[in-house]
Image: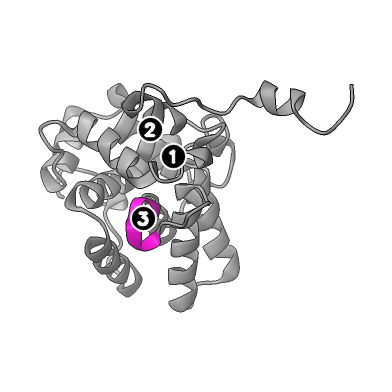
Amino acid sequence: MTDIDPRAAIPDSSLARAITEFVRDTETELLFNHSSRVYHFGALAGLQRGLSFDRELLYAGAMFHDVGLMPSHSSAHERFEVDGAFAARDFLRSHGISEEDAYTVWTAIALHTTPGVPQHMHPVVALVTAGVEMDVLGLTYQQYSDVEREAVVRAFPRTPKFKEDIIQAFYEGIRHKPDTTFGNVKADVIADKEPHFHRGNFCSVIRCSAWHG
């Protein structure tokens, strides 16, 4: 993409190419394009904020952040974010990435639906969430130029009804384990699709515990 800062380009490395191949073979086109946009918007946010970040690690975090929605990487009882985090960690380990760097990516993926925390952490953790918040929620839409937004979307298109399509993709990935959405924004997805869904309540957990008083 010649219309955006080359420092936000996908890394030209064997690791990045392996990540691209793996995620393209694992995810739907909807999620692959979404994850690719998350990388670019996250990298651009990093440049805007003057952060120093490893593009390969950011690419890994962005591309794997929704892998846990896919049946091939979805556990029965873990949050989908954690499933994706473990998939990324195992992949990075198998490609000789250090435990410290793999754990940074693990953390970025595990926390990407936990508002208010990632922006205070390691740049890779902060920027994966920044990319997600831009592409899904549009929270920082005006902080990107028209040229930047159009270039990213031209390279990795949004579907005509992306807003509803991504909500449906979230639902399909977590509907079999609604309890894992307790205390998480994804509980809103289950409630949207299943009007009779009763989400967990933190105060009820306290009041119903085995403690007396």
Q: Whole-percent x and y of residue 156?
A: 16, 47
> Residue 93: image x %, image y %?
50, 74
Q: Earlier in the sequence, mark 2 or mark 3?
A: 3
Q: Which residues are magenta?
A: 67-73
User: Badges 1 and 2: C-beta atoms under 8 Å apart?
Assistant: yes
Q: Residues within 10 Å of mark 1 (few under 14, many from 20)?
A: many
> In the rendered image, which residue does mark 2 sit on?
133
Mark 1–mark 3 CB contact (< 8 Å):
no
Q: Residue at x 55, y 29 (%)?
A: 116
Q: Main secondary structure of the magenta part?
A: helix
Amino acid bearing label 2: Glu
Residue at the disc numbered 3? 67
Q: Is residue 208 left or right of residue 13?
A: right
Q: CA distance from mark 2 to mark 3?
A: 17 Å
User: Badge 1 is on which residue?
Assistant: 129
Can residue 139 be seen here? Answer: no
Kindly indicate the quadrant of the structure image that contains residue 204: top right
Tell me the kind of residue under disc 1. Thr
Label 2: which secondary element: helix
